[in-house]
Image (cartoon, grey):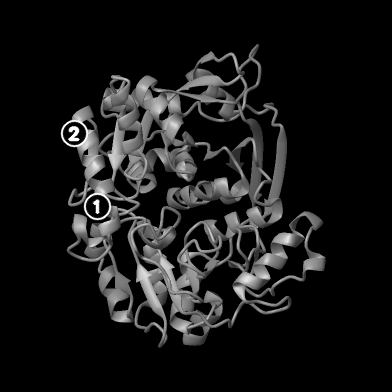
Amino acid sequence: MTQSNAVPKTLFDKIWDFHRVGERADGRELLYIDRHVLHELHAHHGFSHLEKRRRPVHRPDLTFAVQDHTVATKPGRDDDSNPSGAAFLKAMRDGTRRNGIRLFDLGDPEQGISHVVAPELGIVLPGATHAVPDSHASTVGGLGALAFGCGTSEMTHILATQVMALKRPKRLRARLDGRLGPHVGAKDVALRLIAKLGVAGARGHAVEYAGSAIAAMPIEQRMTLCNLNIEMGGRSGFVAPDDATFGWLAGRPYVPQGVLWDRALAHWRTLESDDDAEFDREVALDCSALEPQISWGTDPSQVVGISGRVPDAADVAPSRRAAAESAYAYMGLAPGTPLAGLPIDRVFIGSCTNSRLPDLQVAAAIVRGRRVAPGVTAMVVPGSSSVKREAEAAGLDRVFRDAGFFWGESGCSMCAGGNGDRGAPGERCVSTTNRNFENRQGPKVRTHLASPATAAASAIAGRIADVRQVLAGAA
């Protein structure tokens, strides 16, 4: 609520202003970063730059590191399971040891994707600032944190100073209201919003997701929504924390305990936009009639409902027509083609978008007692070793294996194929990842973005499928 005699503020402004420590001559502001998480693809560059300049890591106690992008997912993996990644793993190991940084390495019980590990361990907290040298850093905004992806030079600057130089984003509120229907989740909401706004629709903005649909979402789904914020150009994205957030965080290893928890909780309860706070833009989406969504093209805005057809270029906004024409050719699809029923070769369930325990539970409930269609390769890769353990304790691994899925060790896997998990040229893949760019999941692989429910149903059907029809048919 707005306090008397105070200028109304958005939640973004509250967090930003609290962490602002100065301004550069070029107009960028210096923002203190509470937690910094590194991954092996870029960390060695930062360590090397600092060592050449004889500068230490300023706050190793606030810096964490993971091995996630290049790690193999096959059982019994080691450094040599993916030879192209071995040098990255070793460099990360050496750099974190020299600098006193906590590394979640291969074999560590908490190893996994940075955007999965940080929230589940309580490394990132409501109202905190967070940075990762990865574009999907804002995933953790689902907890009410303000998170930013950073480039290699920005990562090095944070390592040296614990601050990040940023142009202050504008403020956008996305109001998502309505009750989601059965088998429709945050991934479907995010894809529909990106389709509405376009891949640059939120460029230059920090996005606050609000509304009744958000309030009803479990924390893991809020993280899925914030994960896809970058796919519409957003600089950061977050959901105001609430009682669901606080309950989800309670007792996690890096979360304050005892009296410190009480103090933290009292502060976290103030983290909301004031009633009269002004946003630079507002957008709205009624989620009540939303059906499962599926991408048809080569960017995350080229999306239709599962009952829809590939659009004609004439029906696409003029600014998007050239992209549509290019997508037709790459995806091997003609305007008017129905998406449901399109034969597929591969299904991937995983990535920082959809690899948490509830994602796997949704998929397992659909495949339980069924078999992957002949000719389809299906993979499930948990987002962290903790998720994998919890899933195995619940018997989900057996459900997937019995159905004919590969059950992998945690890591980024097929999201960008940096660990060797890729499709074959020409394959059509239904994927729970966040990007469907040309060649993203392998040379000439045709990727259709979808939710875990749609991916699981499609694996069983052997074609892009409406999960509601698959389950109705079984009933």
Q: Looking at the picture, does residue 152 appear above or below residue 197?
A: above
**Nearer to the camera, 402 or 262:** 402
Instruction: Name the residue located 61 percent from the left edge and 28 percent from the top edge.
Output: 10
* Quarter location, residue 381: bottom left
In the image: residue 294, left or right of residue 114: right
Left or right, residue 128 beside residue 54 = right
The one nearer the camera, 217 or 205, is: 205
Q: How many neighbours does mark 2 have within 10 angstroms: few (below 14), some (14-19), or many (20 or more)?
A: few
Residue type at mark 2 is Arg
Q: Nearer the viewer, residue 99 or 337?
A: 99
Q: Position of residue 8 (x, y in %)?
A: 65, 21
Instruction: Tell me the residue that label 2 is attached to.
Output: 97
Separation of disc 1 and disc 2 at Cα?
17 Å
Query: As displayed, is residue 435 above or below residue 311?
Result: above
**Where residue 65 sits in the image (x, y, percent)?**
29, 39
Name the residue: 40% across, 62% down: 414
Which amino acid, mark 1? Answer: Ala
Q: Secondary structure at mark 1?
A: helix
State the count of labels: 2
Task: Let me know if residue 155 appears in the view.
Answer: yes
